[in-house]
Image (tube, rainbow, N blue to C red):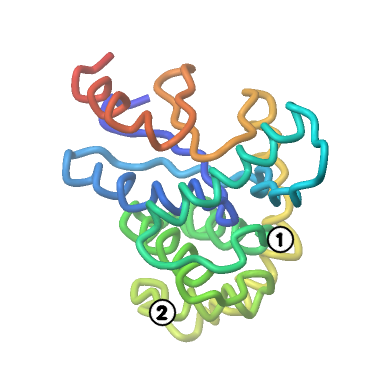
């Protein structure tokens, strides 16, 4: 891996990934490009209702879940709603893979897509589940729409979702599982994982030092 490139595993439905988004993108100003890798991770746990005579472990789990909610709201760039939503991000991930692996788009286009999907989902509270949802986002990316109109990229995109996209998605998910990556964001330097946005300062320092 290039010392100026960071592998970042993310999940569009993960608020931890969303909260890390701006910090990850800010690495570009340090000359570091982001090699995004989409995966599916666990949604936030819904805090249980407090019950009478709850045991210590039950209370601990409840308070931990409540703390996570409060912590996320505190650091979010805006008020978040439906933070325990469980969204199927398969098509959104295929949109990413279509740009990256099928069209071989440059990093700026990939970054724009990742940011757009996160904003569409969490800031604007819009759907990212269907092929049409993602097509709507793709339509706003200028470089895609500068293609020759005869290419009819919308048709190519729909076909990708029904064939090659499913294969690319399976390969990506299998690779992450093989490496034991199941939480997001997770950053890789070589084969060493760093889990969580709190590790970004350390990750940046390591990359700049070339270690």
Residue 204 position (above or below residue 43):
above
Q: Are marks 2 and 1 in contact (CB under 8 Å)?
A: no
Residue 132 position (above or below residue 2):
below
Residue 22 position (above or below residue 52):
below
Q: Which residue is mark 1?
A: 88
Quick check: can you spot residue 168?
Answer: no
Task: Report whether 130 appears left or right of 109.
Answer: right
Residue 6 pos. (x, y %): 36, 33
Quick check: can you spot residue 87?
Answer: yes
Per the rendering, the mark at residue 140 is 2
Given residues 28 and 94, the one toward you in this image is 28
Secondary structure under badge 2? loop
Label 1 environment density (alpha carbons within 10 Å; few <14, some 14–19, many ≥20) = some
Residue lying furthest bottom: 149
* Residue at left offset 38%, top offset 33%: 198
Task: Report whether 113 appears left or right of 46.
Answer: left
* Residue at left offset 46%, top offset 47%: 71
Residue 134 pos. (x, y %): 57, 73
Where, quadrant-wise, is the C terminus in this rendering?
top left
């Amino acid at each position: 891996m290039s010392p100026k490139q960071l592998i970042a595993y993310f999940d569009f439905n993960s608020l931890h990934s969303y909260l890390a988004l701006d910090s990850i993108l800010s690495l570009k100003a340090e000359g570091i490009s982001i090699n995004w890798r989409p995966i599916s991770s666990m949604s936030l746990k819904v805090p249980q209702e407090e019950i009478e005579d709850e045991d210590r472990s039950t209370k601990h789990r409840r308070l931990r879940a409540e703390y996570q909610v409060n912590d996320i709201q505190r650091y979010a760039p805006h008020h978040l709603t439906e933070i325990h939503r469980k969204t199927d991000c398969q098509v959104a991930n295929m949109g990413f893979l279509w740009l990256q692996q099928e069209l071989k788009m440059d990093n700026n286009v990939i970054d724009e897509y990742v940011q757009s999907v996160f904003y569409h989902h969490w800031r604007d509270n819009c759907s990212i589940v269907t092929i049409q949802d993602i097509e709507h986002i793709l339509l706003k990316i200028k470089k895609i729409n500068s293609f020759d109109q005869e290419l009819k990229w919308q048709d190519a995109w729909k076909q990708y979702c029904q064939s090659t996209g499913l294969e690319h998605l399976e390969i990506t998910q299998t690779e992450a599982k093989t490496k034991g990556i199941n939480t997001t964001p997770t950053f890789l330097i070589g084969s060493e994982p760093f889990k969580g946005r709190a590790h970004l300062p350390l990750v940046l320092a390591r990359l700049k030092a070339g270690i």
